[in-house]
Image (spheres, rainbow, N blue to C red):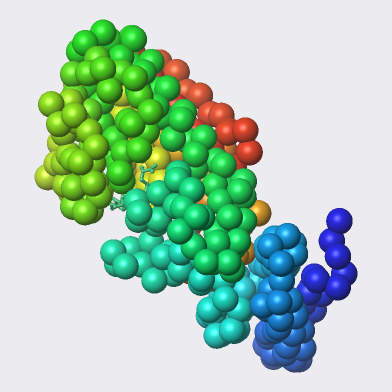
Amino acid sequence: MHDPQTMPRPPRPTPVPSVQRNQLVLPVPERPAHEALAEARGWLDGIHERMMAAEDEVLHQDMHSLHLGLLTLRRRWSEEDWKSFCTDTARKHPLRSFVHQCPFTRRAFERPRGYAGDAALIDYLYMDRAADELHAGREVYRYMHQQPSAVSVRERRELLARALDATAERVPQNARILSVACGHLREAESSAAVRERRVQELIAFDQDPLSLAEISHHQPLDVVRPHCGSVRALLAGKATFADLDFVYSAGLYDYLSASVATRLTGLLFGMLRSGGRLLVANFARFPPETGYMEAFMDWWLTYREEDEMRALLGEVPLEQLDSVRLFRDSQDNVIYLELTRR
Ligand SMILES: C[S@@+](CC[C@H](N)C(=O)[O-])C[C@H]1O[C@@H](n2cnc3c(N)ncnc32)[C@H](O)[C@@H]1O
């Protein structure tokens, strides 16, 4: 249940302007409701004070209140008001430095590789590095590590590892696989088929040479072939692949516009050979961490529901489509779209 002491009251709804004979009567007060913002700031002050003094368990409770409260504000405010709250209030509040003691939160915000959601950030969810941190950073990180989205990211890795193994069973010895935006390709580390070299080729495609270098340290390079390239290069036909048995992409579509995602889906489907499978993952709206991610991590994803995932079929030739499957993970957070080619 929501604790009234720790939840900000919802902002007042912005009055709807009324039009009288060509005359626009502006609502008063102009958005965003000043008092609502002041109230939200006061609420952050309270959480910050308690967190500074908190024991581990209390700190987790305050993180919980923070997540719930931010999600509530995000739902109730207009997109514009929410964005200005994130930039003008949350990010300037001393609570930001406090939660940035968590290396996962801080890395998302700082973007040391120049883009959001790099593979080293996702490693904070795959691995547990809590032991390396001091008190507050450790507890904020621990909290984040246990959240439903983090569980979904780990589950996604396992699902992909099983899909690699299943492809090797379906196409013994000859399977050719492409991972688009592979990051550190951590799923391959849990795949017996890759470890035992029962796939012919796993092309690890990513724009980030640092991520590909990390793969080279962990994977058998006679099977895993790093390939540096961007979605833009794929769409422009500068990087092309064909005759693949399995193509997948996780942690990429969450950053793509509908038009780019639709074009990419059509293109990747066209790289499959008969019987081949395309699997793409996307976060559904809205995981409970969304408000915290946007306000304190500056991490904005494109969330999609089932109908938006289905719309990605827009450039897939339907006569070549054997099956379409949509399913969610155990947390209801990630939607998977799976296509098989005739
Ligand atoms: C969130 S990570 C996901 C990594 C991995 N697939 C996983 O599930 O753990 C996103 C990856 O997408 C890559 N990426 C983002 N935009 C890209 C683009 N336009 N072209 C190629 N790779 C891209 C990044 O370099 C990063 O490694």
96 vs 261, left or right, is: right
Task: Name the one closer to the observer, 84 or 128.
Answer: 128
Q: How many marks?
A: 0
Whether residue 258 is visible: no
Task: Name the one closer to the observer, 163 or 339.
Answer: 163
Q: Quadrant of the N terminus?
A: bottom right
| Residue 260 in picture, x, y percent from top left | 34, 49
207 vs 76, left or right, is: left
Whether residue 174 is visible: yes
| Residue 104 in picture, x, y percent from top left | 47, 60
Vertical relation: 49 (above or below) 283: below
| Residue 214 in picture, x, y percent from top left | 23, 46
Task: Name the one closer to the observer, 265 or 317.
Answer: 265
The residue lying at 46 percent from left, 68 percent from top is: 106
For residue 342, which quarter of the picture? top left
| Residue 305 in picture, x, y percent from top left | 57, 43
89 vs 197, left or right, is: right
The residue lying at 55 percent from left, 85 percent from top is: 92
For residue 107, which quarter of the picture? bottom left
Vertical relation: 83 (above or below) 194: below
The residue lying at 73 percent from left, 60 percent from top is: 57
The residue lying at 53 percent from left, 29 percent from top is: 326
Task: Name the one closer to the observer, 212 or 81.
Answer: 212
